[in-house]
Image: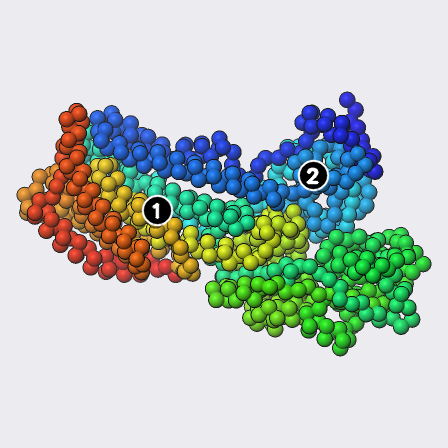
Amino acid sequence: MIPIKPSVTHGLTAEEVSERRKDGRVNTAKNTVTKPLSRIFIDNICTLFNLVNTIIAVALIAVGSYHNLLFLLIVFCNTVIGIFQEIRSKRTLEKLSLLCTAKATVRRDGEEQVIPVSDIVTDDVILFKNGDQISVDARVLSGEAEVNESLLTGEIDPILKTAGAPLLSGSFVVSGQCEAVVEQVGENSYASKLAAEAKKYKRLHSQLMVSINKIIRFTSCFMIPLAALKLLSDWWGHTFEMKTSVTATAGALLGMMPQGLMLLTTVALVVGVLKLARKNTLVRELYSIETLSRVSLLCLDKTGTITKGTMSVTEVIPLDGTTSEHDVHSLIASAIRAIDDNNATAEAVKQYYEHRGTDAAYTASKVQPFSSQRKWSAAVLDGIGGVYIGAYDRLLPDAPTERMRELEDAGKRLLLVAQSDSTQIDAVNGTLTPLALIVLEDEIRDNAKEILAFFRREDVQLRVISGDNPRTVSAIAQKAGLENADRYIDTSALKTEEELREAAKYYTVFGRVMPEQKRTLVRLFKEQGHTVAMTGDGVNDVPALKEADCSIAVAAGSDAAKQVSQLVLLDSDFASLPTVVMEGRRVVNNITRTASLFLVKTVMSFLLTVCDILLPGVSYSFQPIHLTMVGLFAESIPGFFLTLEPCRERIKGNFFNKVLSSAVPSAVIIVLGVIIAQLVLQPALGLSPDLTNMLCVYFTGTAWLVQLFRVCQPFSMARRILWVLMVIGFYTGTALMAVIIPLLSQFGLQVKGVFLLPTPDMIWAIVIAAAVTFVLDFLLVKAARRIWPAER
């Protein structure tokens, strides 16, 4: 079938659209927001931890140690919880993502229609304007636009597209308007690669992610070799007994796996994502919550953050005494209508003249749309010549008068209207005659002072980076209460990166900033040691958003800005930022607080297995059921409650160092307790091997609960109750297991000796060990913090 080419004025018919959908020529794209259900199940079931757990379970079944399979219940619960939370998160995020799904304006059946980009079909006539994301491959039919292809090529200079020029999916319009015919959609275009291309330029920095990956790599490298060495050690030492050795090795392997830490981190982050979703904040990157909570410098644009972003014209001041006021207004109305830009400033001027009822009496033969690079737009009006509208410092740098400076100091935005005797408007040509000054204002947000004060209290430095006049931006920022807002600079006067670097060290307000300068400023702030967040809504913010550690866009912003951002504020209100920061702090602080509880078992199992291999008389005697019992009251239950409690503290120090300095001392104390129990107390108290193993379990639980005591500091009433309940739960639970489990032997399960009630001598040893552990814990933690300083 010969493809039907639509007319520009009519577009495709409904029948032609339907035919293309049936043929599969529709812009279906992969879901880049969430994973499919099948992938969620595979990712949670087919994990390294589950594989090792399965192998261990098979080994225990093979030797008949069925009572030690209790850990499978925890593995099953962990997997189910992980799947449930991801599915819940998926559904929530998919609902929210619909609110910021990119839309496109197409012409069908002679009418303009706004549709999701996923409904675009081949041969659609699509209309592009400033700020639009180009989500299909197309070719310009009419009009002209400047297009940024930085997401595809890395080159940020805009490219002029005229009739016949190709438009690539993944680029975006920075100025002008055009109509284009769609040539490639779906998998045949760059659309499906857009998210990957956008994120390719960014490497999300997460201490949590890096630290957990370090732990996983370490344990993965040593688990199997240590297990093999332990079995060989038992064989060579003539202590090998199949069931005992396999059970002890299984216990060591289970202890080395930080699976609780993985679940804790994932669930805590997912819960944080869901909480933010209820606050109308869409989180595209799970770990970006942590990144924002660690931010030390936040870059803001004036418009839409400090101000409401609703520009309005307060007055138009004629400057040319030879042109009547009526003609001046008519010239401006004609030029602004012909240029037809859709940015907030142009819309404000349009509305002003619509309300005035001014006739657009002149016809334009040529237009030059506004560009953030040029800072001006222009039109050639018949019989008049070129009429320029834009920043006075780009059109007539010597124009400022005392009155203009007074207006700027009052926070007003000024646009100069100038007439040229030339009809060439690709640049500022000919002699310019000032015609009028358009005065605009943008109201300060009601909560701006509160938001800025919040970040000041939280030691987050603020920088305002704007394309507007620095005097105007500074005046508005000072009214909003921004600290050091009187330190401002016009970055258009800075020609080298070294000049920009020096400015970045001192100034708070940066005006007349070009898009590439925004990106450079963000990079320079990072070089100063800051974790930088960038807020933006326009296409000119995209380079800086990609460069920032954490990027934040608003739903009302351009498609391009939303595509590259990790967080999208769906209500377009930056008042949500303090909530996001506080939620991030809660998640990260609580994970940091409780992660050491889960890491104790990993470090202890590693050290004790090494001692088992190297030291005669020392053995890894824990069975899986022992660690399950101790871990239930020392890590699982308290970890769950501590992770979900409120926390507004500032994040301080290095996650990995803080966790190690807390976990290693407790692990060392446990290993020392086991060695003393096996080499000293067993012969001194005449304990049987089973009672010695039970003493080791009590020592382990005691040391772990002492660490929980430290983790709960400072005590609140809830934490005090939690710790007391865990102490009671461990000792009474262990005693109950000693009574209940032997009864299972009546059903054929050989479990005698797994849990035993302590003898009076053992009770005294446990009490003394508890007292000594508190002292040792204090001393070893102090030493560990010197080895792994939190500030490093």
Taking 300 as reference, is 220 left or right? left
Q: Report the quarter where the N terminus lies.
A: top right
What element does badge 2 sit on?
strand
At horizontal 77% and vertical 62% (from top left) the residue drawn is: 390
Question: Is residue 528 depicted above or below 365 in this figure?
Answer: below
What residue sits 75% from the left and 73% below the top? 404
Q: How many numbered marks, from 0 up?
A: 2
- Residue type at the position of mark 2: Ile
Above or below residue 504? Residue 58 is: above
Name the image quarter holding the C terminus: bottom left
Q: Where is residue 448 in the image (x, y as percent from the top left)?
A: 58, 64
Q: Nearer the viewer, residue 563 or 151?
A: 563
Q: In this view, does 115 lie to the left or right of 210?
A: right
Report whether residue 713 is seen.
no
Q: Mark 1 points at which residue?
A: 640
Q: What element carries label 1?
A: helix
- Residue drawn at (71%, 71%) of the image: 408
Residue designated by label 2? 115
Q: How crowded is mark 2: few (under 14 residues within 10 Å), some or many (20 or more)?
A: few
